[in-house]
Image (cartoon, rainbow, N blue to C red):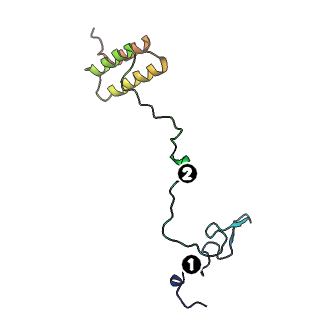
Amino acid sequence: MNNQPPSARGSVDESCGTCGGDRRIGNSFGLTTTCPSCHGSGRRPEHTGFHDVTKTKESHHRPTNRAPVVEKKLWPTSFEGGQLATEVRDSATCREADKPRLIREIIDHETSHGTCTQTFVKKMRKLVRPPAMT
């Protein structure tokens, strides 16, 4: 028997902590497989303190196949949408907190319909303009 403490002997004489030196482990279904810790040697693996995980394959340095991030529009592109957004921005009756939401709604409507429809323009002007005094 070795009289040296385990730390002085190194990991050569120590059995694997996962499989106990049996080289195989089993699960609750009765299946056995090679120990993932010692890879079937039955001895505790050597730990050098450094494990290089640098990816050196050329495939790791290729550009990704993801589509580039599309920037969100900040202002409507159509003439009617731009006029409507300007009215929203310059409105004195519309709350400042609602203005960005309304402009975003104009941009979204433009994106889905191609342009601002007359019905949409009337709806937005009702929200922005002060009610008529009679």
Up/down of 19 relative to 7, above or below: above
- The local secondary structure at tag 2 comes to loop
Query: Which of 64/27 is in front?
Result: 64
Q: Residue at x 52, y 43 (%)?
A: 62
Query: Which of 61/89 is in front?
Result: 61
Up/down of 127 relative to 69, above or below: above
Which quadrant holds the N terminus?
Answer: bottom right
Q: Residue at x 62, y 70 (%)?
A: 38
- Please name which of the two marks, 1 or 2, marks the residue nearer to the observer: 2
Q: Which quarter of the figure has residue 122?
A: top left
Picture coordinates of residue 67, whole percent (x, y): 51, 35
Up/down of 5 relative to 40, above or below: below
Marks 1 and 2, how far apart at CA:
32 Å
Position of residue 25 in the picture relative to residue 6 (left or right): right
Identify residue for label 2. 57
Identify residue for label 1. 11
Q: Residues within 10 Å of mark 1 (few under 14, many from 20)?
A: some
User: Is residue 81 something that shows in the picture?
Assistant: yes
Picture coordinates of residue 29, whole percent (x, y): 73, 63
- The local secondary structure at tag 1 comes to loop
